[in-house]
Image (cartoon, rainbow, N blue to C red):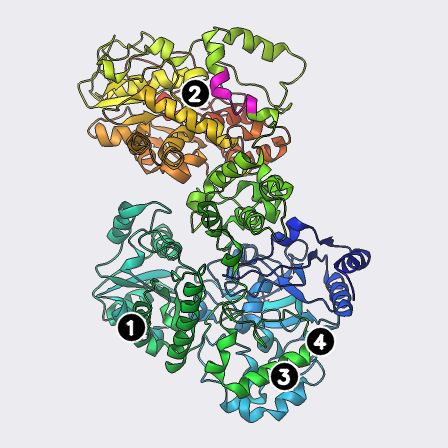
Amino acid sequence: MTTPGEVERTLRAELRGEVDFGAAARALVTMDASNYRRVPLGVVAPRDADDVAAALHVCAEAGVPVVPRGGGTSIAGQATGTGVVLDLTRHMNGLLSVDPAARTAVVQPGLVLDRLRDAVRPFGLTFGPDPSTHSRCTLGGMIGNNACGAHSVAWGTTADNVTELAVTTYAGTAHRIGTGWAGAPDGLRELVGAHLGLLRTGMPPGFSRRISGYGGLDALLPERGVRLAQAFCGSEGTLAVVTEAVVRLVELPAAPALAVLGYADESAAADAAAGLLPYRPLTVEGMAEDLVGTAAGGVGAGAAGGAAARAALPRGRAWLFVEMPDEGAARAVVRGADALDALVVTDPAGQRALWRIREDAAGTATRTPDGRMAWPGWEDCAVPPARLGAYLREFRALLAAHGLRGTPYGHFGEGCVHVRIDFDLASAAGVARYRTFSEELADLVVAHGGSLSGEHGDGQARAELLPKMYGDDVVRLFGAYKDVWDPAGGMNPGMLVRPARLDENLRFEVLPATPFADGVARCVGVAKCRTTEARGPGVMCPSYRVTGEEQHSTRGRARLLHEMLAGEIVTGGWRSPEVAEALDLCLGCKGCLSDCPVGVDMASYKSEFLHHHWAGRIRPLAHYTLGGLPAWLRLIARLRAAGAVNAAARLLPVPVPGLARERALPELAKRPFTRDAGVSGPASGSRSGAGSGSETGSRSRSGSTSRSGSGSGSGPAVTLWPDTFTEYLAPEVGHAALRVLRAAGLDVSLPGGGGRVCCGLTYLSTGRLDRARKVLRRTLDTLGEVPGPVTVLEPSCAAALRADLPALLPDDPRAARLAAAVRTVAETLEEYAPHWLPPRLDRAVVGQTHCHQHAVLGDAADRRLRERAGLVGEPAGGCCGLAGNFGFEPGHHEVSVACAEEQLLPSLRAAPAGALVQADGYSCRTQIGQLGGVRARHLVELLADGLEDGPAAGPAAGAADGAPDTRP
């Protein structure tokens, strides 16, 4: 018997691509985006078709199964396996050619769909099928699943858009198939000829979303042109490995228009969808009000986001989104539809905003209204469109009968319904209910003439139930079809033909029953974190975009943590070097908390891991230097040694131990913020003095009076939080905040304690959780009762207080009260000084939105404040790359710079002359200064400079040559 070690050595000898049978590589591919988990033997990344053939031949000789894998976003388990996983994304990801005249492209299987669409857009072309995972799914995976997407109502499935395929079988034999019998494996023509009657009468009546099983097998009938490539699509890696494909492209409409139709309820919208098909729409998408409740705002948006989304939609409780080639066609749909209300949107920005509501709703479906997770498994059943309304009514009743919840939405124009359901897949009783529900739902779908899968394939989730849909004779024919292509049965066994049971190999059964495990299991693997290009305001996942390595994606890290808890592959527990290596390049940006559809919080998981990983051991030096930064800065300030430290940092020929040698240390402020502002706790009734003696009682440009001396505003009481960065590194930000808040008429105080209040951020980021809890308890003791809002200038500190504080001290009611009181400057002004008009700056602005503000706090109030102040432009999205201590730690500098080069630094270079540079985060400002050569400023500094009584205290540093100036 061939051992795994022998297989690995033979593969290394025969292939030019990477071969990895290590624990980390295997752990990363145990799961896809489904409920299933299978442990592979190893992972191979072939360089080309010859490597694929060699790998298949070696595995066939050894009797080792093979699973081809693209983006790993399959939701039925078909991208997992027990043998060798072929990672086709690392090297075989090219766009080989485009022929605009013929409207075709030649692609490799690992090419991401969006890369193809971006490349052909200049020709006015696109690839028609567009699943929601378009930014990370691969063409090979789309061929394997016969993927569809929203526009298949107009342009068909992937099978309809593939003309030729180059494939290699388990034995290593290459075939090129298209139309006709050329390239077919031996015996296939004879098999089809012997079963013509069954293919003509035994297959369910065709409709566009019959994806289940080898649903395209009747494409081999002579009257249908013997379309071998089309029949191969949807085979889920069970027949052979695709090494190249010729795909058909379609013309993009020049000016599409969107008709949004409102209906009284979901059933009315579903009943109406089929009647719109004669208008030849590009897409007909449907959703109901239970998906809008928390849509349009990301994780945690709550009722406000839902209200904004509803306000943008026509009247109704369910909606159809109907895209048409032009405005005239859209208005014809509105006239012909029996809708309660409707609107037509022609401008691209307006259409994107409305589509965002629909896309956000899809993310919302992963949670129930009470926050429980909902899981795939029955994600994409489809019925003929005319039956959709009746089917949905019975589907909702079936859910209720089993005590389950799920929110349907999807491609109503093709009768395809997406839904995630709150199955309990961790207990025996819950798994038993999952099986019973699955069997009954399969019966319901078949009763309506539907397909168990309408888009994503059957995998392990539904293949066991295929006899209900096709009958035993057709299922036996499926088995014979596989055997012609794969007589040894080595291609992705357990899928489609002779499948594993739908209730075995569930990924939850290996996890302990702990809150941490529940958090890790939240990652369902849809891989939005694997997007390779930073676009728009999104942050996740900066380290993956730099390295391109799965272990540096949010999903990859979650998978490693999952396997660490399971203990089968990753056996080191909390001391696991594999997990430590993957988490080392996690910037703690929290982008996944908002950008991930299920709100995975890898920054928190990293803190928990580091807490256990270093328990009872001497930590890396950076954990004591950077992790203990508040204590060090407080000591330096107490000794009045800031000047000496600054001089030493400039003159010492060697870097500070434990810190990156490529980084210059930021200068410490000579005097802490509170020493000049005056410190008095709110409990004493006294208020802080003037920032630096510059407040003169003059009237601001908006007409409000700026307070002087120790006099406080007459408006609501506000506590200004002296975070570590403002206190010891950037006191000018604090002084500017005092001036702005008082100019708005607010009564501002600072907490007592001489800089002893701290959010614990640096301790959190280095996993010193016990120390963080101690610091936070001391902070709560020092702070006492807070009379009103707590304005926090540093976004990372505000996020720590708002989200991490109550999580770390759940039993202390003071923690929840402080978290609820936290406001950004913009939120404070909007809520407590709503009539104050900021000074008009009327300038262009560039810069960086802090990752934690994007992920935890939101920046809607900041955007509105900038608009009122006449600041034109948007800060860069993505991550600045410094990320607190990350960019100062040894070994991180290259990744830190690469993150900044994605959006931030290019935006600075492209800034108009005289643009202001804004960054509210101290890390962002430091990164901009060190890499961009320009002094960025906090929003309150820009506003303070615009007040009539002159610039804020302290001169602004000049801009570097050719860089934007920060001075008004």
Q: Is residue 327 left or right of residue 878?
A: left
Indicate the amino acid at tag 2.
Answer: Thr
* Above or below, 3 relative to 485: above
Q: In the displayed orientation, state which residue is furthest to the left.
A: 714
Asked if the residues shown at circle 1 and circle 4 are in contact, with their CB atoms under 8 angstroms apart, the answer is: no
Q: Earlier in the sequence, mark 2 or mark 3?
A: 3
> Disc 2 to disc 3, how far (Cα)?
70 Å
Q: Which residue is mark 4?
A: 488
Distance Cα–Cα, label 1 vs label 2: 57 Å
Identify the element where label 3 is drawn.
Answer: helix
In the rendered view of the protein, which quadrant contains the C terminus? top left
- What residue type is disc 1 on? Arg
Give the residue at mark 1.
Answer: 393
Q: Is residue 625 magenta?
A: yes
Residue at 55 percent of width and 48 percent of height: 565
Q: Quadrant of residue 94?
A: bottom right
Magenta residues span 624-632
Nearer to the camera, 326 or 232: 232
Nearer to us in this view, 437 or 211: 437
Residue at 44% from the left image edge and 15% from the top image edge: 728
| Residue 557, label in figure | none
